[in-house]
Amino acid sequence: MKAAELIAIEDLYGAHNYKPLDVVIERAKGPWVWDVEGKKYLDCLAAYSAVNQGHCHPRLVRAMQQQAEILTLTSRAFRNNLWPLFAKETCELLGYESMLPMNGGAEAVETGIKLCRRWGYVTKGIPQYDAEIIVCSGNFHGRTTTIVSFSDDPLAKDFYGPYTPGFITIPYGDAEALEKAITPRTAAFLVEPIQGEAGVVVPPPGYLARAAEICKAHNVLLFCDEIQSGLGRTGKLLASEHEQVKPDVISIGKALSGGMYPVSAVLSSREIMNVFKHATHGSTYGGNPMACAVSREALRVLVDEKLAENAVVQGSYLMDELRKIRHPHIDFVRGKGLWIGLVLKQDGPKAMTYCHKLKEQGVLAKDTHDWIIRFAPPLVITREEVDWAMERIRRVFA
């Protein structure tokens, strides 16, 4: 079936909550995808960092196929043989003691919020229903009702109230604002080490380290959302490692399964995680054998193929090459590792215009907040493939 026909069917039967580029992808391998007409593209979004290991990595495909024939789901009513190993290996790799498995990224953030609030009541002694969590302007942590309650993006938030209370918003990257906002009711500070949906916004050097110091001094949990920034994307397994920070709580997802299956998790210390007791939180699919089998292999691939290290090498090169482009509509380029935002001046065409032009050249990238183009290819990308992309990016900005 032709792309136009499929798009028409989607527009007729599908909800219109997304406005994707009009490319209909049929198959993929590594950093490459092909549409239904057979045209080849370089994927420079990586499903918002879910396919850091590349599309359809053979080791992940094999792990999924093998597990699908053995056992896929038990629910948490019964134990399975893979969840203990997945928990042990993930905790040891990332330096934590305890882990709670979920499915989508927003579920993990919601779980982390519940963990921080419960810790605030049970351990810190905040009067029940008074706990506050400090968040940042420009944040993006998902699209559930609670999470959009503290969003400042009208598209994400408007017409979904009444909103969940208990969140205090401060400017991103401002450690002094964090310290001023803390009160005896503050349970946690929820922050992205690098803001992804806001346009790959990198905070000032030392910001996260200072935030960690402030949180420790005031007995406040530092909760870092590493769902997009984690698992190799910025050149470290966790973006918080760039400032030698170990958050009290982290959420991970997306690349945790290499794009094969929805898998997410919250990690913390045993002391903090143990505020959860029987029946206080759960998920039917969380920790299921299929998720565990795929995710265990996905983490091994990240380590075995040194994908974080490749993100440093190829990301530095790509960022340098993008900064060499001289064009009246380009303002500046920012990022970390293979997570890059090209920021346009607001006196010319919007980012989506350039994304359409890039698509015609065989490069798939996505806009955010009207004036920013994100470049975040799978971490398996090679220097030759970066050069291939740059040749076409230069044509668009000639």
Image (cartoon, rainbow, N blue to C red):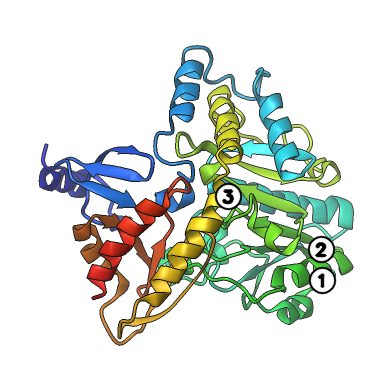
Please tell me which of labels 2 and 3 falls first in the chain.
2
Q: Which residue is mark 1?
A: 214
Disc nearest the viewer among 2 and 3? 3
Residue 263 x, y percent position in the rendering: 54, 37
Residue 66's mark?
Answer: none
Please, what secondary structure does the residue beneath circle 3 have?
helix
- Labels 1 & 2 near each other (Cβ < 8 A): yes
Residue 220's mark?
Answer: 2
- Binning the other alpha carbons within 10 Å of mark 3 as few (below 14), some (14 to 19) or many (20 upward) gives many
Q: Residue at x 58, y 51 (%)?
A: 309
Disc nearest the viewer among 3 and 1? 3
- Binning the other alpha carbons within 10 Å of mark 1 as few (below 14), some (14 to 19) or many (20 upward) gives some
Residue 266 x, y percent position in the rendering: 67, 45
Residue closest to the eye, 356 or 20 = 356
Q: Residue furthest front?
A: 384
Side of 391 relative to 88 (left or right):
left
Q: Residue at x 21, y 65 (%)?
A: 357
- Residue 293, can we see it? yes
The Cα–Cα distance between marks 2 and 3, rounded to whole angstroms, is 30 Å
Which quadrant is the N terminus positioned in?
Answer: top left
Side of 127 relative to 9 (left or right):
right
Please tell me which of labels 3 and 1 falls first in the chain.
1
Residue 308's mark?
Answer: 3
Disc nearest the viewer among 1 and 2? 1
Please tell me which of labels 1 and 2 falls first in the chain.
1
The Cα–Cα distance between marks 3 and 1, rounded to whole angstroms, is 29 Å
